[in-house]
Image: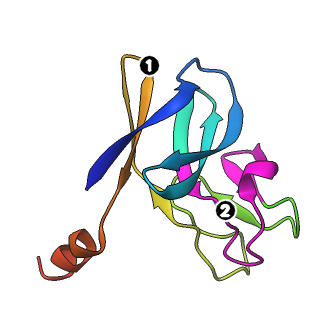
Amino acid sequence: MKWYKIDGVKNTGEPFIKKVKAGKKSICLVGFEGEIYATAVACPHAGFDLSQGLCVKGKIICPYHRYTYSLTTGKGGEGQNDFLQTYPVTINDNDIYVGISSFWDKVRRVFK
């Protein structure tokens, strides 16, 4: 896994939703109740930009169809049967880092 520092965003404890880059990958970065979460930027249902949505009760809400996804697990709301990709986040001196697994990292996990 490679860790990418997210430029232009600091951990201030304030709520936010932003579209950022982690390496070459677009990520939806969410500050909610003092925690930072990273998810895929595109809604798996309709492909809409989740960074334009909102966050309520630990779930990000797609601005297009109002589908909801857990910030911690990526699990879709009841009856959705879909998942949103989530990424690990770490904070170091108020700088935010997002971990992105490569294809080979994922293959290695299968064979452990």
Q: Which residues are magenta?
A: 38-61
Residue 62 pos. (x, y %): 79, 61
Is 35 situated above or below 77?
A: above
Residue at the front extreme, as displayed? 24
Give me the residue at 64% from left, 59% from top. Answer: 41
107 to the left or right of 6 = left
> Is residue 52 rendered to the left or right of residue 57?
right
Q: Which mark is residue 69?
A: 2
Horizontal side of residue 13 vs 89, given as left or right: right
Q: Is residue 51 magenta?
A: yes
* Depth check, front residue: 79 or 4: 4
Query: How far is disc 2 from disc 1 in space, using C-alphas?
Result: 26 Å
Quadrant of the snapshot with the N terminus? bottom left
Q: In percent of the image, x 67 and y 66: which residue is there?
A: 42
Task: Give the number of the disc on residue 94.
Answer: 1
Q: Is residue 77 left or right of residue 7?
A: right
Callout 1: few (<14), some (14-19), or many (20+) C-alpha neighbours within 10 Å?
Answer: few
- In this rendered view, identify the residue nearer to me: 59 or 93: 93
Q: Which scheme is used to colour this image of the protein? A: rainbow
x and y percentages locating residue 16 in the rendered image: 70, 33
Quarter placement of the C terminus: bottom left
Q: Is residue 10 magenta?
A: no
Q: Tell me the residue at 22%/79% (across/down).
A: 107
Q: Secondary structure at mark 1?
A: loop
Q: Position of residue 103 (x, y in %)?
A: 29, 74
